[in-house]
Image (cartoon, grey):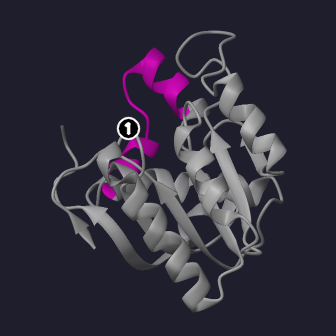
C-alpha cells in the first residue's frame, strides 16, 4: 500500500495492514513507535486477544526537553491496562551520535540513517525501534512487523528480521507493506 501523503491520516489503515499481515504470516511480534501514545493506544485496541506480542517504543525522557517524557499519562494508563510492553530508552542511532554532531557538526551514523530515509522517515524509525525492542529483550531476533510514521501517526509498515543494535546493520527489510509515496511535509 502506498499512501499519497505522509501523516496521521494513514494511522488506521497502516494498523489494519500491520495486524492483517501479522495474522496472515503468523508473525508473533509487533513493534509500534509512539510519541504521545495515540498510535500505541489504537494498536493496543486492535491487538486485543490476537496473541500478538505488542511492544511500544517511546522516545527517551529528555528527547525534546530535559527531564520531560512525551508519552502522555492517559495513554500510558491505557497501555498498562492492556498489559502492553513499553520500551522507553535511547534510539540506537540517536544518543552518542547526536551528542557528537551537536559538538563537532558531523556524526558518521547520519550517513546510515539518511540512507534509510531514502525510503521514508518511517522506514528509519521502524528499523530503530525494532533494534531497541530487541535490545530490551521484548522481541526475539526473528521476523517482526514494525510500524512507525513520519512525525505523527503511523504511515509505514515493514516486515523486518529483528536484530539488536550491536547488529543493527544485519536487520533486513524483508517487505515494505505500507509507506507514504511522499513523506516530506
Label 1 crowd bin: few (<14), some (14–19), many (20+), radius 10 Å: some
Closer to the camera in the image, 12 or 95? 12
Q: Residue at label 1?
A: 151
How many circles with numbers are drawn on the protein?
A: 1
x then y, percent, for residue 174? 46, 82
List the single residue furthest toward the bottom.
25
Left or right: residue 33 versus residue 45 is left
Left or right: residue 170 versus residue 104 is right
Give the position of the C terminus as an image quadrant: top left
Magenta span of residues: 97-115
Query: Which quadrant of the view contains residue 89?
Result: top right
On whether residue 91 falls in the magenta region, the answer is no
Q: Can residue 88 be seen in this view?
A: no
Disc 1 is placed on an element classified as: loop
For the point 67% across and 49% down, the residue is 56
Principal SS element in the magenta part?
helix
Give the position of the N terminus as an image quadrant: bottom left
List the single residue furthest toward the top.
66
x then y, percent, for residue 149? 40, 49
Query: Which quadrant of the view contains residue 139?
Result: bottom right
For the point 25% across and 57% down, the residue is 118
For the point 64% across and 71% down, the residue is 162
x then y, percent, for residue 110? 39, 42
Q: Can residue 81 be seen in this view?
A: yes
For the point 72% across and 72% down, the residue is 52
Closer to the camera in the image, 145 or 80? 80
Above or below — where is 146 with respect to 57?
below
x then y, percent, for residue 96? 60, 31
Above or below — where is 35 with respect to 33?
above
Amino acid at each position: 500500500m502506498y499512501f499519497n501523503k505522509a501523516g496521521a491520516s494513514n494511522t488506521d489503515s497502516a494498523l489494519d495492514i500491520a495486524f492483517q499481515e501479522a495474522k496472515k504470516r503468523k508473525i508473533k511480534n509487533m513493534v509500534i513507535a509512539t510519541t504521545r501514545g495515540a498510535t500505541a493506544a489504537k494498536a493496543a485496541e486492535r491487538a486485543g486477544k490476537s496473541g500478538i506480542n505488542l511492544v511500544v517504543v517511546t522516545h527517551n525522557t529528555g528527547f525534546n526537553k530535559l527531564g520531560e517524557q512525551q508519552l502522555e499519562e492517559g495513554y500510558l494508563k491505557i497501555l498498562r491496562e492492556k498489559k502492553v510492553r513499553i520500551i522507553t530508552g535511547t534510539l540506537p542511532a540517536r544518543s552518542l551520535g547526536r551528542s557528537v554532531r551537536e559538538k563537532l557538526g558531523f556524526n558518521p551514523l547520519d550517513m546510515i540513517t539518511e540512507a534509510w530515509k531514502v525510503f521514508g522517515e518511517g522506514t528509519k524509525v521502524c528499523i530503530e525501534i525494532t533494534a531497541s525492542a530487541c535490545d530490551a529483550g521484548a522481541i526475539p531476533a526473528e521476523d517482526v512487523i514494525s510500524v512507525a510514521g513520519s512525525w505523527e501517526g503511523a504511515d509505514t509498515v515493514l516486515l523486518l528480521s529483528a536484530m539488536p543494535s550491536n547488529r543493527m546493520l544485519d536487520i533486513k527489510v524483508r517487505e515494505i507493506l505500507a509507506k507514504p509515496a511522499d513523506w516530506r511535509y
